[in-house]
Image: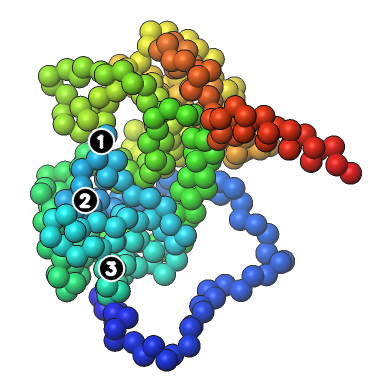
Amino acid sequence: MTVAASPSDLDAEHPLEIRVDKPFDRRVPIMELFPPMPLASWQDTKQTLHRFCQVIGKLRLAASVRRNHWWNVPFHLTGRGITTRPMGQADGNPIFTIDFDFIDHQLRIHTLDGRAVMVPLQGQSVASFHDQTLQALATLGIRVAIAHPYPFDLPDADRPFADDTTHASYDPAWANRYWQVLSQVNLVLEEFAARFSGKVSPVHHFWHTFDIAHTRFADRHVDQPPTADPVTREAYSREVISFGFWFGDDRFAEPAFYAYTAPEPAGLADQPLQPAAAWWDPRDGSHLAVLRYDDARASGDPRATVLEFYESAYQAGARLAGWDIGRLACPGGITDPNLRRHQDQSWAQLANDP
C-alpha cells in the first residue's frame, strides 16, 4: 500500500511535471478494434478480477446515494481503467473516488483534498485485496462497511471475501486487454445510445454480472411478481430494451454482444436479427439476442456489425412492445428538427465541395 501526499505538502515552486508513458510512434498501427479475448486464456484472471470488482462495487453501493434502477452502483470507464465516480459526503465521509488502473495495475483511492492511497492489483488474493482496501480507506479517514461482504451470484457466494485465498491470479496483460475491450465496446454503445431521445441509462459496467450495458426505457410501469428480489424489482420497474456485452462464463463460454426486451413481448424470438450470425438464445423462459464477439470480429466492419445487431434487436422488441419508434428516434444525436435539417445541409455541402 502506497500513500501519496496532499497538495499542501508539496512545494508550489516546483515546475509542472508532465509524464509521458509511451511516446507516440507513427510506425505503430492503431490498436485493433475488438482484439482476441478468448475466455479460456484469462479465466483465472477474470475470476479473481470479478471478485475484486465486487469488493469495490459493494463499497460503492454503501457509500453512494441511491439512484433509480440502481444507476448509482455500476462503474464507468476512464482513460486508465474503471472508476466508482466520486462518493461520500452525504454519509459523513470525505468525498472520495476508487479507480482501477489497468496500466500501472493499481487500485487508486483519492480524496477531494488530494490525498491518495494505492493498493497493488498483482500478487493479491481476494482476501488480501479486501483487507488492504479496507486498511487504505481507514488510512484516509473513510469509514464504509460492506453490508454483505460475500460474492454476489457466484459459485462461492457463501464464502466471505476475507476468507478467499483461492482466487489469486492476475495476469497484467489480460487485465489490460479486458479494459481495452470494455473501452471499445463502451464507445460503440455510446454511439448507439445517441440514436434514442427517450429515457436511457448511462453506458456502465456492472460489477455483479461483469458486463457493460446501456438500457432504453418506456414510461410504462411493470408489476413484478411478489417473489422478485429487490435488485430485479428496481432494475425492471419499467419496460426496457437493454443492450450490452459480456466476457463469457460457465453458462456461455465465450464473449458476446447481447440484447433483450423485458417484459418480453409475444413472438419476439420469431423476429429477424442482423447480421445472419445472430440468433435468439432461449434463457430462463425468455430469449436473448446474441452475437458472438468472434463473429463480429470476423466481419468486414466490426463496429458497423455490432450497431446493426443492436438496431435489429431494438426494432424487434420496440415494434412488438408498441413503442413509438419514430417519435423516440434521435438521428445524429439531435432532437430538434431544425438543427437536424441544418446539419444535413452542412454535410451535403461538405460532400459536394471539391
Based on the displayed image, in which of its 4 quarters is residue 170 positioned? bottom left
Place of residue 35 in the rendered image (x, y in percent of width and height, measured from the top left): 56, 49
Residues tagged 3 and 2 counted as in contact (Cβ below 8 A)? no
Q: Residue furthest right?
A: 354
Residues tagged 3 and 1 counted as in contact (Cβ below 8 A)? no
> Pointer 1: what residue?
68
**Sequence-wise, which precedes: disc 3 or disc 2?**
2
> At x 56% / y 46%, what residue is drawn?
34
Query: Looking at the rendering, in which quadrant would you find the N terminus?
Result: bottom left
Total labels drawn: 3
Q: Which mark is residue 112?
A: 3
Cα distance, mark 2 to mark 1? 12 Å
- Mark 3: few/some/many CA within 10 Å (<14, 14-19, 20+): few
Q: Amino acid at mark 3?
A: Leu
Place of residue 209 in the rendered image (x, y in percent of width and height, measured from the top left): 30, 40
> Pointer 2: what residue?
64
